[in-house]
Amino acid sequence: MKTQVIRCAKRETSRVTCRKNVLERALPAALAAYGEVFLFTDETVFALYGKKVRAALGDIPVFAMPAGERYKTHETLFALLSAMAEAGLHRTACLVCLGGGVVGDIGGLAASLYMRGIACIQVPTTLLSQVDSSVGGKTAIDFCGVKNLVGAFFQPREVFADPAFFATLPAREVRCGLGEIVKHGALSADIFDALQANRDRLSDLSFLAGIVPANIAFKAGVVRADPTEKGLRKCLNLGHTTAHAFELSDGKLSHGEYVLVGTLFEAEYAKSLEGSDEAYLCALQALCLAVLGGMPSLPDAGEAARAALLDKKNTGKGSVVLTVPFAKGEWRLAELPVAKYAQTLAAIGRKLC
Ligand SMILES: NC(=O)c1ccc[n+]([C@@H]2O[C@H](COP(=O)([O-])OP(=O)(O)OC[C@H]3O[C@@H](n4cnc5c(N)ncnc54)[C@H](O)[C@@H]3O)[C@@H](O)[C@H]2O)c1
Ligand SMILES: [Zn+2]
């Protein structure tokens, strides 16, 4: 068992624990401190783990949303808040979010809003939500066609990451989580070395279970240093500007797959920066391709760049900010005018695709 404590601000402490048998042991023990407990999950996860939840937590109220990003909406948020109000939850209640990043993001936002904030425990069940979304206190819903437009910083009291959930995870969801793990590898030399050393078993459940704590520790360290993304936390956007550009203009791959594509493209761009380590950037690209299983077919890169204008990370001055890999464990911020970014993406697309 490994526990990380993230102290973000006065009285805002989040504890992240990696351990087995979370539903049977750690969760019931942690919930003993609360008068009322409400479970938020999605239908897929509840179909798989509902029986275990009932056996461990008894007849608590449950709200299960339909699974998937397209339900990450204000309608789902308000349906959840209504269910919490109808259950008569008080300020001392705890909301448990059992599921992937969609459940975690909506549930965290609901916990921050209900009675101006009640306790929240995250039990992430996907690889992506364990290594990324459940740690750091970012919550959100998609709104007016823009991803994560409405949200808040709100730290969960606890996060319990149990590798047993990976046993039921579809291969595509594993690849999605690996996208964020490779991103961490592009920022942390230790994670990069572990990925390089295990290139032929990247999707083995035992390898994944072993690498989750290092990823959580890495993200927790960044969040601790910069809880509200004033500086260092921007490193976690590595590969994401280009990933979001393709995600918005194409939408056929998963977020994690686009993160791999974004990292590939931005590594290519970084080769043109003075002092960058080309051999390392090539190795990082090879890692991205190994997880993707080859270069996917992608839409017109110029269109993707224009779509990036809708992204939160553009400066609003006709330019786009990228967090790019640079050398092992090193990254840089680059700001490019949209037209230049479009040309650059198009040229890289012609070279790589
Ligand atoms: N808050 C943050 O810092 C942050 C960071 C990264 C991503 N995100 C958000 O996370 C979301 C993506 O998260 P995700 O990839 O976990 O998606 P998700 O929550 O949609 O889960 C993916 C699918 O896997 C299913 N699933 C979940 N656990 C399972 C299990 N153990 N076995 C079988 N199926 C299971 C779900 O029902 C769903 O169909 C996006 O909305 C993204 O914006 C947030
Ligand atoms: Zn991401």
Image: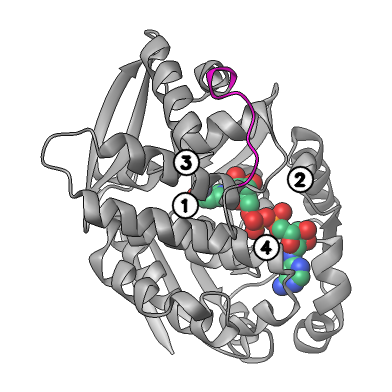
Q: Give the range drawn in magenta.
A: 296-303
Q: Which of marks 4 and 2 is nearer the N terminus?
A: 2
Q: Main secondary structure of the magenta part?
A: loop
In the current view of this chain or complex, which residue is farthest to the left?
275
Marks 1 & 2, CB-CB < 8 Å contact: no
Determine the image quadrant of residue 232.
top left
Q: Which residue position is annotated with label 1?
A: 137
**Mark number, residue 320:** none
Label 4 packing within 10 angstroms: few (<14), some (14-19), many (20+):
some
**Residue 261 percent across, percent down from the top left:** 51, 44
Q: Which residue position is annotated with label 4?
A: 173
Q: What residue type is labelled 3?
A: Gly
Q: Quadrant of the C terminus?
A: top right
Specify whether tag 3 is near ligand 2 (CB below 8 Å). Answer: no
Q: Which residue position is annotated with label 2?
A: 81
Q: Earlier in the sequence, mark 4 or mark 1?
A: 1
